[in-house]
Amino acid sequence: MFEISLAEPIFFYKAGEFTAPAGWRHKRLHHQRDFEIFLGVTGTVPLLVDGEPVELGPGTCVMTPPGATVEGAAETTEETAFYWLHFFADWQEIEDGGDPGGALPGRFAGELDRVRNGGFSAVLNDVCLLPPRFSPSRWHRAVLALRQVLDAANRFRYSQRECDFLTGALLVELTDDYLRGRGDAVEGRRPRAAPVAEWIRSHISADLTVAEVARSFKVNPDYLNRTFKAAHGTNLRDYILDLKIETAKVLLVRTDLPVGQVAHHSHFRDSRNFLKRFRERAGVTPSEFRAAYAATHLNNEVIDPRIPVPQAAEAYLRGAADAPPA
């Protein structure tokens, strides 16, 4: 497990969205002082990280630490797409015991209950804890956080620090997702509402109601709503709506679909209701949201445009200093 400090500066290096047809193989790359995050979108990319096989598949997050060598284990058998991001940070590797459902290691033991119950943890406040590979349950949120980094990286800013802060926010989002999932997996502590959330994700539609969810689980709607809110911090109606809005956000930034089709694929009955609900939740129109995430670095196995490298990160990569200047 990687313990990444939030008390020290985090420096964004480079990022992009990669697509390739079947038959592509990841070239051999050696990381110097930089981490790399992969977020799988479509297809499966077989990798070797320091000789160990790792699969980057849809909805998975893979992290490779400084000093690691990454290469393709074989050619892909289908079209693939994934996000990638490099950054520098103060970090250390800590032993985890290999049990994803057990307590956190070392001084972090006992903090999972605080996180799962929505409490503040002073012990975890200044760190991110992430494994080499996991599957975020809130994958859409991770994608949106990374897309925000991409948008900032590909637009002119008077300061290079925006990407640094947004990279830190991405790490916090991933860590929060990982810790909550790990807390839910602790034996005897899995909330009753967890299967409900998964059922909603797989059965969501324009007509899905709280009453229908309750009927499927053979419980009273009010009781189920209270149980669900205690576990997730939101009621069922708002959870269903937020899930639809999250779907719409990803479609807006990842596709060129007209807004009306985005509404349909996000399980809204009509565009007018979609526009109203989206503005209520996001504070902007769908078109304004799309425009805010428009800039990106897209590359493939043939074209890889030059990436402007922040001066602090470039100096750090060259080893010109022990640490990037603040």
Image: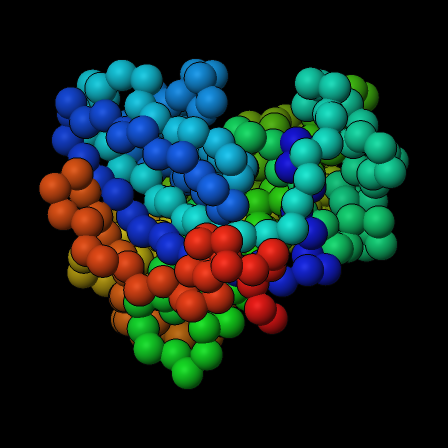
Residue nearest the viewer, comparing 128 with 111:
128
Residue nearest the viewer, comparing 145 with 310:
310
Residue 33 visible within the image: yes
Residue lying furthest left: 302
> Residue drawn 84% across and 33% down?
106
Query: How far across and how far down the image is residue 121, in percent?
Result: 82, 51
Q: Is residue 61 left or right of residue 225?
A: left
Residue lying furthest front: 320
Q: Considering the image in quadrants, where does the N terminus appear?
A: top right
Q: How many marks?
A: 0
> Residue drawn 19% across and 55% down?
305
- The answer to which image quadrant residue 272 occupies is bottom left
Residue nearest the viewer, comparing 236 with 128:
128
- 196 above or below 33? above
Query: How far across and how far down the image is residue 38, in percent?
Result: 42, 39
Q: Is residue 99 left or right of residue 137?
A: right
Query: How far across and how far down the image is residue 50, in percent?
Result: 47, 22
Q: Considering the image in quadrants, where does the C terminus appear?
A: bottom right
Query: How far across and how far down the image is residue 218, in percent?
Result: 63, 26
- The answer to which image quadrant residue 122 occupies is bottom right
- The answer to which image quadrant residue 238 occupies is bottom right
> Residue drawn 27% across and 16% down?
74
Residue 178 visible within the image: no
Residue nearest the viewer, comparing 136 with 92:
92
Residue lying furthest bottom: 158
- 119 above or below 188? below
Q: Colour scheme of this structure image?
A: rainbow
> Residue drawn 23% across and 22% down?
76
Q: Is residue 183 left or right of residue 170?
A: right
- 280 above or below 117? below
